[in-house]
Image (tube, rainbow, N blue to C red):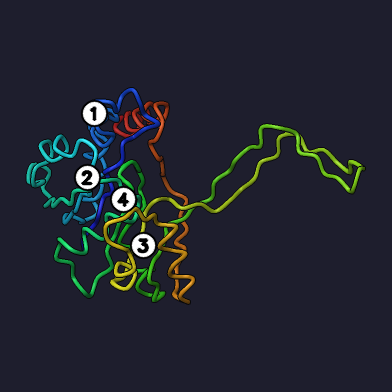
Amino acid sequence: MKTVILAGGRGVRLRPLTYTIPKPLLPVGERPILEEIIRRLKAQGLDEIIVAVGYRAELIETYFRDGAALGVRIDYVREMEPLGTAGPLALVRAQCRLPADEPLLAMNGDILTDLELRALAAFHADGGFELTVATRQFELQHPYGVIRTDGRRITGIVEKPTETDTVSAGVYALSAAALARVPSGRAFDMPDLANAIIAADGAVGSYAFDGEWLAIDRIEHLEDAGRILAERDA
C-alpha cells in the first residue's frame, strides 16, 4: 500500500523560518518533520512512499533521496505551481504506478500522529467509500461572551463558551474512483474532492480517532512537537 505525503506548501505561517528552509525540513527534536513522519510510516509497515513536493523541492529530494537510508522507497512528484491539498494527487495518478486493488493513503506533510493507517484503510474498504477522511473532535473556545436574544431582549449571556466540532485530521484513504475525480493542472483541495463525491451521490466516510495528533503550522507547534518527542524518548 502506497502513502502520499503532501509536502509542497510554502509554510507561510512558519515564516521567517521557511524563507530558506521548506517546512518538511524544519526540525522537531533531532529530526526534520518529514523524517519523523516517514519513520512512523515505516514502523507501521508502510515503506512505499510518494512525496509531493513544490517549494524548495530540491532540498527535500537531496536530503531524502530514494529513501534507502531510512529503509523505505521514496518516489517524488513535483508541483510547478501550488495545487492545493488534493491537486498533487493528479500528478501521482499520472506519474506513479498504483495498485488497483488497494486504497491510496494520503496525509498532510506537517502532521505527527499515531493513527493506525492500516486500520483506516480497512475501514475504508469495508465501508465501500470513495474517500475516507480521518476525523477527530476539536474544541474551540469563543473569545467573547455570547449573547442570546429574543428580539430586543437579552435572554442570556454565556461567557466564552467552548464549541466542539468534528474536523479533518488531514489523513485520507482514496479509491481509484476518488483519485479519478481530481482534475489535472489546477489547484484543488480535499474539501473540493469530498464535496464533488457527495454531489455525485458517492460515499465519503468518517474514520474517527482520538489518539496523538499535532498539526505543525505555527512556530509554537514546533516547540510543542519537540517537547512531546523528548518526553516519549525519555
Circle 4 sits on which residue?
83
Circle 1 sits on which residue?
21
Task: Tell me which amino acid carries mark 1.
Answer: Ile
Along the line of sight, the residue nearer the viewer: 195 or 228: 195
**Camera-nearest label, 1 or 4:** 4
Along the line of sight, the residue nearer the viewer: 91 or 75: 91
Circle 3 sits on which residue?
120
Total marks in image: 4
The structure residue drawn at horizontal position 36% and vertical position 52%, both measured from the top left corner, is 115
Position of the C terminus by quadrant = top left
Measured in 3D between alpha carbons, the distance from the residue under mark 2 to the one under mark 1, in whole angstroms, is 13 Å
Circle 2 sits on which residue?
53
Q: Residues within 10 Å of mark 4 (few under 14, many from 20)?
A: many
The first of marks 2 and 3 along the sequence is: 2
Element under disc 2: strand
Residue 9 image position (x, y, % from top left): 31, 41
Task: Tell me which amino acid carries mark 2.
Answer: Val
